Image: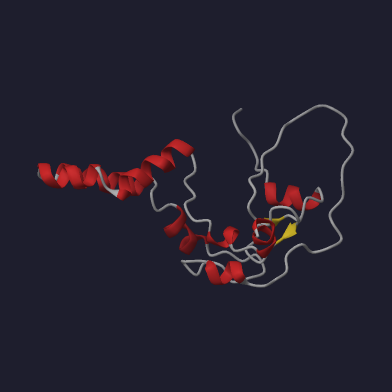
C-alpha cells in the first residue's frame, strides 16, 4: 500500500530520552546540540522503552533564532515554513529549472561561466548528498554543540 503515516523523529527522540526540544523546534542533545540526524529501524523485537528526560537540554539562549537568515524562527519551536523554505531549498528543483533556462539562452562564453560557477557546484553537492535542506545556521549556533568543539 506504499508509505503511510509519518514518523516525527524529533518527537520520537524527545520521548525516548535522547534530548529535549530547542527554541528552533529541533531535538537538542547533551552531546551534539542540534547537530544530529535521526533515522529509525522497524523491528518486531521486544524492546524496553526509555522515558523522556526530566531536564531541558536547551539553554534558551536564542542564538539559533538570531542566526536564522530568513527570520523563520520565533522561539518556542515555532517555524514559519514558508520563510524557511526560501532558504533551505535554495539549490533545489526550481534553481535547477532556472539554471537550465539560463544556459539555453546564453552564448558560449556565458555558458562556460555558468558551468564553472559556484551555484552549479552547490546544486551538484545538494543532489549528491540527497540533502535539499541547505541551511544549518540554527544548528551550528547551539552552544551545546559549540562547547564540544572548543
- Left or right: where does residue 80 sit relative to residue 110? right
Q: Which colour scheme is used?
A: secondary structure
Q: In which quarter of the image is the C terminus?
A: bottom right
Q: In which quarter of the image is the N terminus?
A: top right
| Residue ID at (53%, 61%) | 137
23 in relation to 115, above or below? below
User: Which residue ends up furthest to the front in the rendered image?
Assistant: 150
Q: Where is residue 25 in the image (x, y as percent from the top left)?
A: 65, 61
Looking at the rendered structure, the number of numbered marks drawn on it comes to: 0
Q: Where is residue 95 in the image (x, y as percent from the top left)?
A: 33, 49
Q: Where is residue 10 in the image (x, y as percent from the top left)?
A: 69, 51
User: Is residue 80 something that shows in the picture?
Assistant: yes
Q: Where is residue 138 in the image (x, y as percent from the top left)?
A: 57, 62
| Residue ID at (69%, 53%) | 32
125 in relation to 2, above or below? below
| Residue ID at (73%, 54%) | 29
User: Which residue ends up furthest to the left in the rendered image?
Assistant: 107
Judging depth in this view, the residue of 123 and 112 nearest the camera is 112
Looking at the rendering, which quadrant does residue 20 occupy?
bottom right
Judging depth in this view, the residue of 13 and 80 nearest the camera is 13
User: Is residue 106 something that shows in the picture?
Assistant: no
Amino acid at each position: 500500500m506504499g508509505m503511510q503515516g509519518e514518523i516525527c523523529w524529533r518527537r520520537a527522540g524527545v520521548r525516548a530520552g535522547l534530548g529535549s526540544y530547542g527554541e528552533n523546534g529541533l531535538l537538542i542533545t547533551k552531546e551534539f546540540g542540534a547537530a544530529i540526524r535521526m533515522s529509525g529501524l522497524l523491528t518486531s523485537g521486544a524492546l524496553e522503552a526509555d522515558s523522556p528526560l526530566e531536564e531541558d537540554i536547551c539553554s534558551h539562549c536564542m542564538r539559533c533564532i538570531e542566526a536564522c537568515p530568513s527570520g523563520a524562527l520565533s522561539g518556542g519551536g515555532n517555524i514559519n515554513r514558508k520563510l524557511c523554505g526560501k532558504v533551505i531549498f535554495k539549490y533545489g528543483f526550481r534553481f535547477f529549472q532556472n539554471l537550465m533556462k539560463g544556459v539555453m539562452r546564453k552564448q558560449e562564453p556565458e555558458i562556460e561561466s555558468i558551468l564553472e560557477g559556484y551555484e552549479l557546484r552547490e546544486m551538484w553537492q545538494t543532489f549528491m548528498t540527497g540533502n535539499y535542506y541547505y541551511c544549518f545556521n540554527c544548528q551550528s549556533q547551539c552552544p551545546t554543540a559549540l562547547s564540544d568543539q572548543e
